[in-house]
Amino acid sequence: MKHHSQLLIAAVLAGAAASSFAATSVKATVNGMVCAFCAQGIEKRLSKLPATKAIYVDLKQKVVVVEARDGQTLDAKTITAEITDAGYDVTKLETVEQSVAEIKAGMKAKR
């Protein structure tokens, strides 16, 4: 019985370690977003992508952040195309090892 409980503990610890990896997000600097309606339109388009877990739009900073679902990869070209097709201009795109919540907290701290 002791052996089984050790395996169970090892499995739980492995699961906890796997879930503690940093989230991967694509952070885009976008020109042309001026209102909440703009932000809502972009959020709606990007939320339909299968790999999207969460989205954050900051109008003041002109930033759109898309967080990938666990184990999935976001396609930067698709994100750029969605934003461009919505009528906005992507001026910078980067992949960051942070969640939407972490980026949101960092941006609010800068204000």
Image (cartoon, helix red, strand yellow):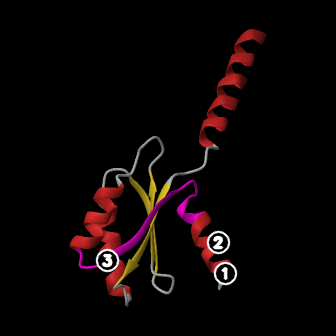
Per the model, the C-alpha gap separating discs 2 and 3 is: 24 Å
Q: Amino acid at mark 1?
A: Lys
Q: Quadrant of residue 26?
A: bottom left
Left or right placement of residue 89 versus residue 24 in this view:
left
Q: Quadrant of the N terminus?
A: top right
Q: Residue at x 75, y 17 (%)?
A: 6
The residue tagged 3 is: 89
Q: Quadrant of the C terminus?
A: bottom right
In x, y percent, where is residue 5?
A: 73, 18
The residue tagged 1 is: 110
Badge 1 vs badge 2, beta-carbon distance below 8 Å:
yes
Left or right placement of residue 52 versus residue 107 in this view:
left
User: Height in image: 32 above or below 41?
Assistant: below
Helix, strand or loop status at disc 3 = strand
Q: Nearer the viewer, residue 15 or 45?
A: 45
The span picked out in magenta is 86-101
Helix, strand or loop status at disc 2 = helix
The residue tagged 2 is: 106
Mark whose residue sits in front, 3 or 1:
3
Q: Quadrant of residue 102?
A: bottom right
Estimate how packed mark 1 is, as few (under 14), some (14 to 19) or many (20 or more) residues with alpha carbons within 10 Å: few
Q: Amino acid at mark 2?
A: Gly
User: Height in image: 22 above or below 67?
Assistant: above
Q: Amino acid at mark 3?
A: Asp
Q: Nearer the viewer, residue 80 or 91?
A: 91
N-term mark: 2 or 3: 3
